[in-house]
């Protein structure tokens, strides 16, 4: 008895379908496990940065707190911080008054320009 190709392979009614399986390589398993680990690390880093930013941020300025008393002075041609400081507070230390004027106006070592409005400590 000789078998034909159709008989050897089996009829379609008796053939079993193969189960659909996914075979992952070692690299595929590492990637599949690594994605959630990386996502968790990114989430933890973002949460830590947010909470550290909140904890280490400077306090908000309150309108209830009174700042130093100041007055406004217009810089005239030929004026310097020295002349303004001696005019505003002649009895105080000139260097301290100059430092206060620089701090109040954010001058950071630059000379004021003529016509510029400066905040100076109020005279008592």
Image (tube, rainbow, N blue to C red):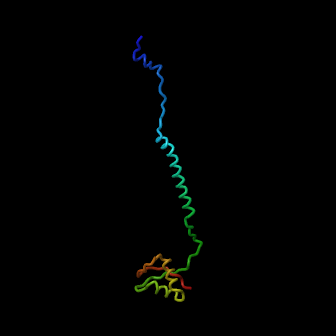
| Residue 108 position (above or below residue 35) | below
Quarter occupied by the N terminus: top left
Q: Residue at x 56, y 76 (%)?
A: 67
Question: Residue 71, image x and y in percent?
Answer: 51, 81
| Residue 12 position (above or below residue 123) | above
Nearer to me, 2 or 57: 2
Nearer to me, 122 or 16: 16
Q: Residue at x 44, y 83 (%)?
A: 75
Q: Residue furthest bottom?
A: 91
Question: Residue 32, image x and y in percent?
Answer: 49, 42
Quarter occupied by the C terminus: bottom right
Question: Residue 72, image x and y in percent?
Answer: 49, 81
| Residue 23 position (above or below residue 110) | above
Nearer to me, 52 or 82: 52
Question: Residue 86, image x and y in percent?
Answer: 49, 87
The image quarter in which residue 78 lies: bottom left
Q: Residue furthest right?
A: 64
How many numbered marks appear? 0
| Residue 46 position (above or below residue 58) | above
């Amino acid at each position: 008895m000789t078998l034909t190709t159709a008989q050897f392979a089996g009829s379609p009614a008796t053939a079993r379908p193969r189960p659909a399986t996914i075979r992952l390589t070692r690299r595929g398993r590492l990637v599949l496990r690594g994605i959630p680990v990386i996502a968790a690390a990114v989430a933890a880093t973002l949460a830590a940065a947010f909470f550290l930013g909140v904890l280490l941020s400077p306090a908000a300025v309150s309108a209830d707190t009174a700042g130093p008393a100041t007055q406004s002075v217009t810089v005239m041609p030929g004026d310097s911080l020295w002349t303004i400081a001696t005019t505003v507070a002649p009895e105080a230390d000139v260097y301290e008054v100059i430092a206060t004027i620089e701090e109040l106006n954010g001058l950071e070592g630059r000379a004021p320009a003529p016509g510029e409005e400066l905040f100076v400590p109020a005279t008592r």
